Image (cartoon, coloured by chain):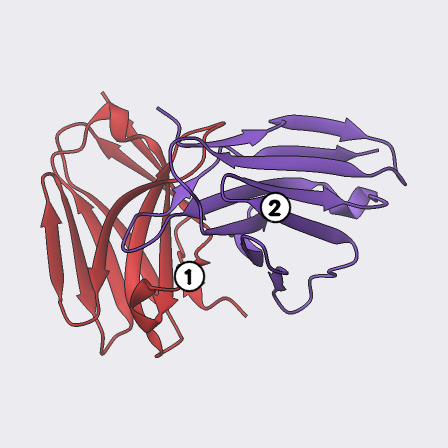
Chain colours: A red, B purple
Amino acid sequence: DQQVKQNSPSLSVQEGRISILNCDYTNSMFDYFLWYKKYPAEGPTFLISISSIKDKNEDGRFTVFLNKSAKHLSLHIVPSQPGDSAVYFCAASVEGGSNYKLTFGKGTLLTVNP
Amino acid sequence: GAVVSQHPSRVICKSGTSVKIECRSLDFQATTMFWYRQFPKQSLMLMATSNEGSKATYEQGVEKDKFLINHASLTLSTLTVTSAHPEDSSFYICSAVGGGNSPLHFGNGTRLTVT
């Protein structure tokens, strides 16, 4: 069963606009969430994370929101840039992420059009 | 630059042969390395966790005798797919982490095709 779900396989956004990538999870034991970005032929690179004790974490153009009651998190990118075009993976872990055992979603392909 | 090097990036082998994939941490000592597998349109699935000098811990449903993991040093872990079959064709990717609160770094992955 898919414990981390990214229901949108793809998203297309105009440059300068906001990109919103969504992620849902089913395991209530998850308490640490991460977003990874992956370009073709490269491994995922860490983008931003959030602990379950927070509901928002911001880093430059990237903001992650967590709604624990809905078991939902989202990644906002604003303004979106063509270089942001990549596959974005949502991941979650238990025990504060200290064990680094991540459960990944299937990913969302973001295309930012110039 | 890359801090985790994975080799080879692509490999094609015949059914019944074994394939070894290497994962190296380049500028840090990796106390723990993880091996993932990703089938088309699926998520990265954790196969096993390996700690240097000890036996790997395999996730449920992963055959330890088929996917041999050796983490002999703090900078190298290898995954050997033994007696590969076409259904083992997949994208295999490793990740590595050092001690403390150091971040998790991924390799670039290996595309395995078994004919």
Question: In the shown orientation, is residue B58 left or right of residue A71?
Answer: right
Residue position marked by numbered label 1 in the rendering: A5
Residue depicted at 25% across the width and 62% down the height:
A73
Amino acid at pointer 2: Ala
Amino acid at pointer 1: Lys
Q: Residues within 10 Å of mark 2 (few under 14, many from 20)?
A: some
Q: Which quadrant, please, contains the C terminus of chain B?
A: top right
What is the residue that sits farthest to the top in this orientation? A114
Q: Nearer the viewer, residue A95 or A41?
A: A95
B23 is higher (above) or lower (below) than A3: above
Q: Residues within 10 Å of mark 1 (few under 14, many from 20)?
A: many
On residue B13, the disc is: none
Residue depicted at 44% across the width and 61% down the height:
A101
Could you tell me residue B81's position as x and y percent? 75, 45
Chain under callout 2: B
Residue position marked by numbered label 2 in the rendering: B72
Could you tell me residue A78's position as x and y percent? 12, 39
Residue depicted at 19% across the width and 27% down the height:
A81
Q: Which quadrant, please, contains the N terminus of chain B?
A: top left
Count of numbered badges drawn on the protein: 2
Q: Label 2, secondary structure: give it.
A: strand
B29 is higher (above) or lower (below) than A75: above
User: Of circles 2 and 1, which is in front?
Assistant: 2
Question: In the shown orientation, is residue B52 left or right of residue A103?
Answer: right
Could you tell me residue B76's position as x and y percent? 55, 39
Quadrant position of residue B49: bottom right
Q: Nearer the viewer, residue B105 or B114?
A: B105
